[in-house]
Amino acid sequence: MEHFQRLSDDDLATCVHCGLCLDACPTFRVTGLETESPRGRIYLMTQWKRGTMRFDEEQVRHIDLCLGCRTCEAVCPSGVPYGRIIEAGRADVEDARRLSFKRRASRVALRQLLGHPARLRAFGALTRTAQAVGLTSVVRSGRQLPRLRGQFRPPAGRVAPAIGERKHRVAFLVGCVMPILYPQSHDAAVKLLQLAGCEVWFPAGERCCGALFAHNGDLEGAERLREANTRVYSAEHFDALIVDSAGCGAHLKDFYPGLKGRVKDLSEWLAEVGLPEPRREVKVRVTYQDACHLAHAQRIKKQPRELIRSMPGVELVEMRHPDICCGAAGLYSTLEPDMSRRILEQKLDDLMGTRAEVVVTANPGCQMQLEAGLRPLGSAIRVEHIAELIARAY
Ligand code: SF4
Ligand code: SF4
């Protein structure tokens, strides 16, 4: 089929249809349908690529409903590069289909908003005002937005000095939505880096990394951002680019060959370079939600848990399925609210069973999703970024 140019025959052929990924797939777990499983989706994309199956909107729904969480990739014994397959498949699908109004609108919003830091800051200020006067319903996704508390701003001179001896120089990804939605997570992350002996550089002119564009099938938009950011990152020397948002970290590792080996998730880096001894006890019962793009795409599960366990007073209790998606998945909770809610309900059941006071994660989308699920239940469980929790010990 002429439209299916990006999907690779070699990638698709790595699937041997064993089905070992099925039980790990959140949409299969909720529906029990082969068509909502990794194997079913790979089969469908293979047939479209070969031109042996008619491409129609009904079938495309199975691709839309994929979270892109990559749990299947982590458990697949054949090494199927599912993340690459679904990104290429989505881009091919978006070329071949007539986009629904909702999907067209999401693409325009991404290009017009996320790619432009000044517009995003203005959007953040407007939303804060709307929240202050009780008008959040004017914002489409207002029901999911946390209460905004100002914006993260890099220090004067765009450098935060190391506390104590300077051992490393790192760049810090400020990103697009995180400085607006969760400035306190960035504040805590930077403080931890400084404590770990890092001088932290905030590159001027850095744009959104492009993760949400790529996940949404807009690979051209993602490429434009990569080119702009690559110019910014080549301007100065740094040991590592530190990322405290799992989705961005996974995208930077996969999509920016110029940064190969130098992109580090915050917990990965802190585990490597070490933090000083904690200064105080934090008595709290915590459970950890693996962000899919940290656990499955970056295969980082051990380091965040070790950091949490290293805090005096903290009790870490595991959920039954901490590494199953919460249903956030970038724009998924907005584009596919019904399936997202069904997946979230399973997550909340699991979460409540731990009797934790705090649920910790490492991705703003997961934070928002968990908060949106817990709020209507009147639950007292707080949602925190891992950096916030660890910083409480200093
Ligand atoms: S994706 Fe991997 S685990 Fe799933 S059916 Fe294919 S080969 Fe098996
Ligand atoms: S990426 Fe997630 S939702 Fe999509 S097929 Fe794989 S496990 Fe299922």
Image: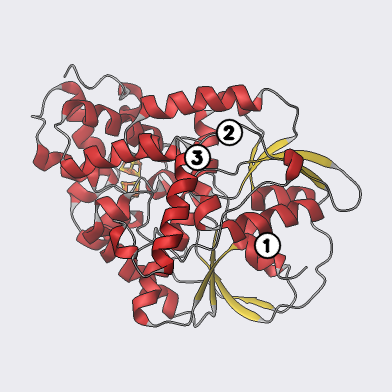
Q: Is residue 195 above or below residue 92?
A: below
Q: In which quarter of the image is residue 237?
A: top right
Local secondary structure at mark 3: helix
The amino acid type found where label 3 is placed reads Ala
Q: Is residue 187 left or right of residue 77?
A: right
Alpha-carbon span between mark 3 and mark 2: 12 Å
Local secondary structure at mark 1: helix
The amino acid type found where label 2 is placed reads Glu
Q: Where is residue 145 in the image (x, y as percent from the top left)?
A: 40, 61
Q: Quadrant of ligand 1?
A: top left
Q: Which of marks 3 and 1 is nearer the N terminus?
A: 3
Which residue in the structure is indicated by mark 2?
Answer: 206
Alpha-carbon span between mark 2 and mark 1: 31 Å
Alpha-carbon span between mark 3 and mark 1: 38 Å
Local secondary structure at mark 2: loop
Quarter of the image with the C terminus is bottom right
Q: Position of residue 272 (x, y in %)?
A: 75, 48
Disc on res. 118:
3
